[in-house]
Image: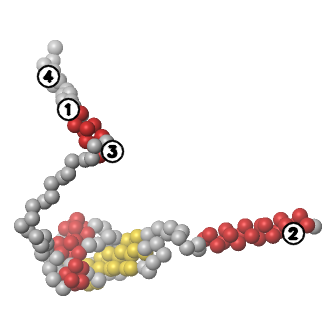
Amino acid sequence: MQNTKLLLTSFTFVGLLALAGCSFPGVYKIDIQQGNVVTQDMIDQLRPGMTRRQVRFIMGNPLLTDTFHPDRWDYLYSLQPGGGERQQERISLIFNGSDQLASLSGDFKPGVSRDEAILGKPSDTNVTPENTGDQPKKEEPPKPGSLLEQIQNDVDKVETVPVPTQEPLDTNPR
């Protein structure tokens, strides 16, 4: 009887530990990506009047093609960081009767990158260092006996070996 109680208690304890491990803080959870990755650069390349083939070349195959609306392509993308909130983006491309791109709608805007929307200025600005008069620092030699010195010595000792080239095949039949 005593062994049965001990066995039952130990199985209960092991079961509770196993269940607690499923939601234990610090457990790595993977990022879940689904759908077509669509970037602002892809949207910026789209122009009205492009054919379906040109759009497919830029955007890839659509995630959804509706049989009731064959002139509409839907691209969906969702990302759920491990344990975080799911983020979803979508864009719909609409073609006219002659299979040319007529319009688009969704979470992206043509010509406005996310950097511009967040910062409120164009993203193609050049960043220059504040002290342009300073020259870059020269690299200091490694300290004697350090690992960096040993690596540098090994690199300096390496001899170059020419790559063997194959002789041309004899094209004259015998």
CA neighbours of label 1 inside 10 A, class few (<14), some (14 to 19), many (20+): few
Between discs 4 and 2, the one toward the N terminus:
2
Q: Splitting the image into 4 quarters, where does residue 119 fall?
A: bottom left
Which element is circle 2 on?
helix
Give the numbered dot on residue 171: 4
**x, y percent for residue 34:** 40, 71
In whole angstroms, how far apart are the C-alphas of marks 2 and 3? 61 Å
Mark 4 or mark 2, whichever is nearer to me: 2
Image quadrant where one finds the C terminus: top left
Q: Which residue is mark 3?
A: 147
Q: Which residue is mark 1?
A: 160
Q: Given the current orientation, which residue lies at the most extreme front position? A: 144
In whole angstroms, how far apart are the C-alphas of marks 4 and 2? 89 Å
Q: Which residue is mark 2?
A: 5
Q: Splitting the image into 4 quarters, where does residue 164 fall?
A: top left
Which element is circle 3 on?
helix
